[in-house]
Each structure stands twice: as C-alpha cells, then as structure tokens.
Image: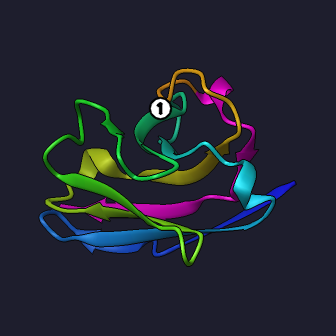
Amino acid sequence: QVQLVESGGGLVQAGDSLRLSCAASGRTLAISAMGWFRQAPGKEREFVSAINRYGSSTYYSDSVKGRFTISRDNAKNTVYLQMNRLNPEDTAVYYCAASTQYGSRYLDNSYDYWGQGTQVTVST
C-alpha cells in the first residue's frame, strides 16, 4: 500500500503562485510515476501533470503548460507542483496520485493510489 498526503492548497488571487506538496509513504519503491489531477465543481476530474520515478520525464496538460512545474525529491518521497500565474479557471480540488503501472500518465485509471485532495481557490 501507498499513502499520499497533499498540502499547500489555499485561497489566492489571480496572478499569484502556490506550491502543492504530496508526501508518499509505504511501498514507495513500487511507484513508477506520480501525478496531479484536479476536479472543479460540476466537472470531471482532469489530468494536470505527472512525473516519472526518476524525474527524467514530465507531462503537462495544455491548460497548465508553461505555468505549472512538477518536480520530485526522492529522498523525501515528495512530489511538488509549483503553480504560477494562477487564474480562476485553476480553482479545483487537486489530487495527488501514484502509479505502480506503466500505462499512460495522462489517464486516471493508470494510477493506483490517491490522496485526499487539497482545495485551491483563485479569486479575481
């Protein structure tokens, strides 16, 4: 089993930055990739970003490319999502996910473990 705990969400104004963290524990050696997804009210959960085990490959949705940066610190078993130039459309619950598979990093069914989510609200 893998446990994931997100932190760093909050209420910010448009144009501000936030950094989300996701700390993994348990069978972390089994993790092949970690990702971030988000779900806005009334919308489906969508892919945001992912990073492979070694940090050598990163993935972004078109809506966040150039504004968000994913990184990881394997010594701390922690993945980060630096979010810059936030806008109200980024408002959502952000979920961290861990995959022990080698499927598409963009699909939520490729991930086996999920955190509880952290709220990000961007006001105008």
Q: Nearer the viewer, residue 31 or 108?
A: 31
* Residue, far right: 1
* Residue 78 picture quarter: bottom right
Q: Nearer the viewer, residue 61 or 73?
A: 73
Quadrant of the rendering where the N terminus is positioned: bottom right
Find disc 1 in the rendering and name its residue. Answer: 46
* Residue 69 picture quarter: bottom left
Tell me residue 118's x, y (percent): 56, 64
Magenta stretch: give its range. 108-124
Assess whether residue 111 is covered by the magenta stretch.
yes
Picture colour scheme = rainbow
The residue depicted at 25 percent of the width and 63 percent of the height is 123
Quadrant of the rendering where the C terminus is positioned: bottom left
* Residue 116 picture quarter: bottom right
What's the amino acid at mark 1?
Glu
Image: 103 above or below 47: above
The residue depicted at 28 percent of the width and 44 percent of the height is 89
Which class describes the residues within 10 Å of circle 1: few (<14), some (14-19), or many (20+)?
A: some
Tell me residue 71's x, y (percent): 36, 60
Image: 31 above or below 63: below
The residue depicted at 40 percent of the width and 52 percent of the height is 55
The residue depicted at 47 percent of the width and 26 percent of the height is 106
- Please indicate whether residue 118 sits to the left or right of residue 87 in the image: right
Tell me residue 92's x, y (percent): 45, 50
- Please indicate whether residue 100 sits to the left or right of residue 124 in the image: right
